[in-house]
Amino acid sequence: MFMNLINIIKTITMSGGFFNYDQARMKNMIDSIEELIEKNGRAKTEQELKDTSWGSSFNYREYFEKYPDEKFWYKYSDEVIEEFKEAVKYLSIAYVYAQRVDWLVSGDDSEESFMKRLKKDLTLKVYLK
């Protein structure tokens, strides 16, 4: 759905610096929200169950037998998941703008290049219909 944008975000190399690279925080938010969407209500993997453990002597199997609901990630409603997807969309657009402005004002792009790259990054998005 948003993979074109996410692929662009992942391939943008570090440059700029006008915003002190704070746009990377937006990327982290995008990743975190996408992870919530992906995990929504699904069973935790064996590794995820182990990672939930509270120390090497903790018997996670016993704990999850006692609390079987804990074997699953939290289940958000379909309505909330749709809003999460909207959040990814808008944060992704904001990220592209922040990145492009950063490169322009940092001297990495000319105004012409800024406009060209901004248009390209935004028009490659499937969700902009």
Image: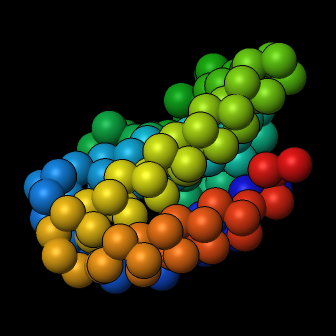
The quadrant in which residue 16 appears is bottom left
Residue 81 percent location from the top left of the image = 75, 28
For the point 32% across and 58% down, the residue is 101
Image quarter of the N terminus: bottom right
Q: Residue 100 vs residue 107: left or right?
A: right
The quadrant in which residue 90 appears is top right
Compared to 114, does 27 lie above or below? above
For the point 17% across and 76% down, the residue is 107
For the point 77% across and 40% down, the residue is 42
Q: Residue 4 vs residue 26: left or right?
A: right
Residue at far front of view:
112
* Depth order, front residue of 21/124: 124
Residue 116 percent location from the top left of the image = 53, 76
* Depth order, front residue of 78/106: 106
- Count the labels in the image: 0
Residue 85 percent location from the top left of the image = 71, 37
For the point 72% across and 24% down, the residue is 83
Q: Residue 98 vs residue 75: left or right?
A: left
Looking at the image, can residue 43 be seen? no
The quadrant in which residue 123 appears is bottom right
Residue 89 percent location from the top left of the image = 65, 43
Looking at the image, can residue 64 be seen? yes
* Depth order, front residue of 106/29: 106
Compared to 13, does 70 lie above or below? above
Q: Give the color scheme: rainbow, by chain, secondary structure or one colour.
A: rainbow
